[in-house]
Image: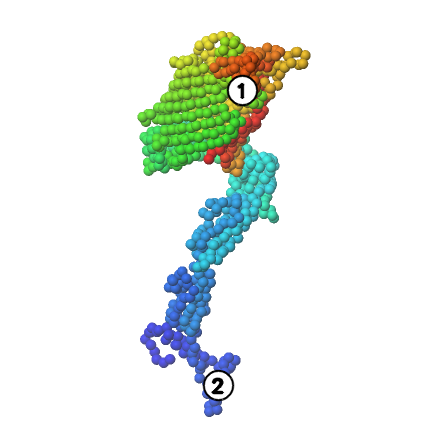
Amino acid sequence: MNGTAKGPAPVSRKTGQWAFALLSSTMLAGIPAGVLAQDTTIPTTSANTAQPAPAPAPQPQGDIIQTIAVQGAQRLEPQTILTYIDIRPGQEYTQVLADQALKDLYQTELFANASVRNENGNVVIEVTENPVINRIILEGNKRLKNDKIVPEIKLAPRQIFTRSKVRADVARIIELYKRQGRFAATVEPKTVQLSQNRVDLVFEITEGPKSKVRQINIIGNEVFSDGDLKGEMVTKESRLVNFFSGNTSYDPDRLAFDQQKLREFYLTEGYVDFRVVSAVAELTPDKEDFIITYVVEEGERYKFGDVKVDSNLRDFDSDTMTRQLNIESGAWYDAKRIEDITEQLTELAGTFGYAFADVRPQFVRNKDELTMDVTLVISEAPRVYVERVDVNGNTLTQDKVIRREMRVAEGDAFNSLAVKRSTNRINSLGFFQEGFEIEQAETADPDRIILEANVEEQPTGELQLSAGFSSIESFLLAASIRQRNFRGRGQTVGAGVQWSRFSRSANLSFTEPYVFDRNISAGIDLYRRDINSFNFVGRDRNTTFEQSTTGAQLRLGVPLTEYFTLIGSYTLNIDDITLDENTFFADFDGDGVRTCEPLLAGRFLCDVIGSRTSSILGANLIYDTLNSRFRPSAGEQATLAVNFAGLGGDVKYIKAELRARKFWRVLGNFIFSLSAEGGYIKGLEDRGGPGVDDVLLTDRFFLGEPQIRGFDIRGVGPRVLRQPILDDGSGNPVVITDRNRISDDAIGGNTYYLGRAELEIPLGSGAADLGLRPSVFVDVGALFNVTAPTLTQSPFPGGLSFQVRDASGNPLFISEDGLPTLETVDSNGNPLSPLNQTIDPFQEVFLGDSASPRVSVGIGVNWNSPFGPFRIDFAHVLKKQPGDDTKRFSFNVGTQF
């Protein structure tokens, strides 16, 4: 290279390559021949052996790419495929360039196979596209249905099949099973090849057994036993006693929660330095169970030191609040008490309008004295007023239906108790989702707040067809339709019919909770009830009298205060009570008139037959603070009901009843309830004669199953027993006292009382999902205060025989063929024998009219079964009175379809 240049001149890529080759050959020419002797043969000539051979001509490193062709593409355009790689015509083809192109193609996950080859500058890219998924099939999944798995799968029909996405979906499915406690679950993906490069993707699932917690080990605990600590945990060991618990399977989230539960337990006992050193869950070799091991340090136990309140609110005096804390210095430290007091102070501040009051406990630990000083600091906050109330989410329900349940209005001072009461009232409507809460939203002004009622409506219409079997009513059928939020106005309309062995009824009802948008409720009920009353002969029920009631009731309710409501009512009933004339009517005096015969029916039944009209005025005073009308867990309710019959009509009495119940949450999620009720009815006219009560049999109280468990239906209270009298063979009477051979008629009472204590036991999530709610109970009650009826007794021996007559009072005779007939003589003119009926000897006994309490204890289970609500009770009677009928087992079940 000669000459000089003023500056670098641009050169083409091809010129640069030739220059590089020329420079390389020039440099090689200066290398001693000996160095190159091992790789290059230098030719010589006879003419001039001393001259070196000329350098070889330069060779390019690769071909220059002239064209690029794509082969094998089906769905993708070749030009689209070329955009995924960096190979272009005019480039020098190298293996590095080809390898990078293959990486780029596979990275798209569009191709199952790809290759790049060079044919003298013509590059050919050959691809095999990944198939398209035709459908996704799940096989072997029984515990997790398709609707639980499919939403977690990212692949879908008409998407491109890729191995990486399949692996990800397999991992997601396995994770779902791990959440269910099935750590041995496996998923095998397979494909079924179809035409047009399509595949069916099949996930073959082996669910495996549910991984249980075989054992929980606790190391380091000295003060409390393993049993005490395991009782605080949510996770339970797989034991027979925990069969109904859904927490025996392993769950990593539950493991972390149990550590928190242990710390909370120790903090309530004063061990403030307690910590969980480690928590390890080990899967057994068979992958069926887990063994969990906790290592804990308990530390020292602390007592309360100085506990005081430091208030920055003007309405809260620190010294006064401190004196009301009721925590003594020197008592064992309990973090739960501090938490409860903090919540109470926050709620108390809210009742004074300080919605944003912040109560923060500050702790000072004295390690030398093992005491904990606590200062409850109430930060300064402005009084807050409600700027507005927003109602959101209601599509059917009108705004006014929700707003009229609010106990705080726009412009009012904020009051946390009023907000809580508003929440309970809206929940009690039953129109919206469970757990509804009124939310609080801050505004730009520190003394203003927005209340938001974000509701989620749920169906309020009920169309029910049911069939079932009850130990009370035997087989029963029912159909009803009801709308509890008619036209979104909060009105209730309903209609229903019911049929069973002993009763038939039909009803129509309508209730308007706010008449003309005023806080006055009104309603009307129309009904027809046909009841077959019965007595017992042993365990067999026999129909005694039939009562048909047609009636209507008008109701009007007015709230007196926030918690007191007065409801007035007027009821008009037309009753028709009849006895089977063929069974209970006879003509003993021979005058041809069949009448109700006490020897057959008993005086108490003969007194009740006939048609009557009842005109009843009623008043109900109700006190209600329950947090829910459907399934209460807190609050109380009391009702005083007074009814007066005699404003016209044929029946005159005054009846009063008092009912009360209260609910508490105890021991965590246990629900304890107490209920009591009592009633008294007084007849206002003398119905005449000894042994006749002033109150009709059909108006009296009755007590038994289901009101007091452990006793049969109408099994408590006054009754008349008709006992057969047999001849001992020597002409002496023997009275039968076996309850299976005597007739038992309950006649009710004019006074009763009833009490119940019940504890509902919470179960694990698995049993709760099944709708199981067990409880233990104690029932106490009595029914009494009725005029002793006039008792009857047939002659002994032989009983009593009387002439049988037809429905028109005509005497019946025995025909020649033995059948009843009105003929008095046979075909030959001979007189026929009269048809007589004989009553075997018996005596009646009056029992059960005692105010002494009847007591029973037992266990029961409510179950929202797949075929309908189910209730079963086992009860044992601790105390009863002569004549009472006991019953150890009862149940009620139905279904909807």
Nearest to N terminus: mark 2 or mark 1: 2
Residue 380 at least partly seen: no
Residue extending furthest toward the right: 730
| Residue at image point 43% right, 16% down | 611
Q: Amino acid at mark 1?
A: Asn
In the depicted structure, whether residue 397 falls above or below residue 726: below
Residue drawn at 43 percent across, 77 percent down: 59
Q: Residues within 10 Å of mark 2 (few under 14, many from 20)?
A: few
Residue 227 spot, x, y in % from top left: 60, 35
Residue 4 visible to the viewer:
yes
Q: How many marks?
A: 2
Residue at image position (41%, 62%) is 74
675 left or right, relative to 68: right
Q: Which residue is mark 1?
A: 535
Question: In the image, what residue type sits under mark 2?
Answer: Pro
Categorize mark 1 by other alpha carbons within 10 Å: few (<14), some (14-19), many (20+).
some
Element type where label 1 sits in the image: strand
- Of badges 2 and 1, nearer the viewer stands 1
Rendered location of residue 496, percent (x, y): 42, 28
Q: Position of residue 275 (x, y in %)?
A: 55, 40
Residue 827: mark in rendering = none
Task: State whether residue 848 is above or below residue 477.
Answer: above
The disc at residue 43 is 2
**Which residue is depicted at the point 59% across and 35% down?**
241
Q: CA distance from mark 2 to mark 1?
A: 136 Å
Seen as rendered, the residue at the extreme bottom is: 47
- Does dot 2 land on a helix, a strand or a loop? loop
In the image, is residue 785 above or below residue 222? Answer: above
Image spot of residue 895 (x, y percent): 49, 33
In which quadrant of the rendered image does the N terminus lie?
A: bottom left
- Which residue is situated farthest in the front direction here? 828
